Image (spheres, grey):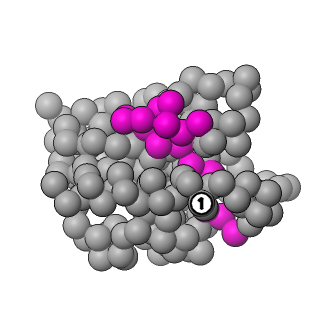
Amino acid sequence: MDTLKAIFNRIKADPDNIQFTRKNIEPLYYAASSAKILIIGQAPGEKAQKTMIIWNDPSGIRLREWMGVSDDTFYHSGKIAVLPMDFYFPGKGKHGDVPPRADFASKWHQQLIKAMPDVKLTLLVGSYAQRYYLKTGSKQTLTQVVKHYRNYLPNYFPLVHPSPRNNIWMKKNPWFEEEVLPDLKTHIHQILSR
């Protein structure tokens, strides 16, 4: 089995990522063989890329609140892994960040997941991760997928992105805070306390 360090070095050396490596930008994700929970989101934001700290923004603060975990548990316990759909900030577009590269996850995720055999639950944050892992395509909206999250348990737990931009969505869908988030915290607490 490949070591996590060997995979990291191959990601850096990949010709598709050379534009970042030449600028001394390293791939931003977190993988540990001891991980029990895996978070798959879109791609690092600009602030996260600059600081090299994953989920280092208001969205990350909210995600940790949703999960019911401290910063210390999130960043230092070795129990939580983070694999964005792309490990590099994709740049800014007209309506927010540019989407992650379409083929990136298929190239690297399975290698890293194989090196984390104790993962019990994967949080799929946002539509890119959900479409890729749940194969929902465009036939289901993100709201439908998140509302029916129980259909994807025990392996996957789909979530809306915790960005402050989704405050309007949350107001329109009060069931998310009332039903989904308490269940998310319960699942995470049970897994982390084992």
Give the camera-side residue of 124 and 180.
180
The x, y position of residue 98, in whole percent, is: 71, 50
Residue 160 part of the magenta-drawn span: yes
The residue shown at (28%, 42%) is 120
Give the camera-side residue of 177 and 126.
177
Q: Which residue is mark 1?
A: 178
Does 136 sit above or below residue 73? above
Q: Is residue 159 visible?
A: yes
Q: Residues within 10 Å of mark 1 (few under 14, many from 20)?
A: few
The residue shown at (18%, 48%) is 33
Left-right relation of 90 to 120? right
Per the rendered image, the range of residues in magenta is: 148-166
The residue shown at (26%, 55%) is 190
Q: In which quadrant of the rendered view does residue 93 lie?
A: bottom right
Left-right relation of 45 to 174? left
The x, y position of residue 154, in whole percent, is: 36, 35
> Which quadrant of the rendered structure holds the C terminus?
bottom left
Q: State the SS at label 1.
A: helix
The x, y position of residue 42, in whole percent, is: 57, 49
Give the camera-side residue of 131 and 104.
131
Count numbered badges in the picture.
1
Q: Is residue 12 visible?
A: no
Give the camera-side residue of 134 and 186.
186
Q: In which quadrant of the rendered view does residue 167 lie?
A: bottom right
Does 49 sit above or below residue 103? below
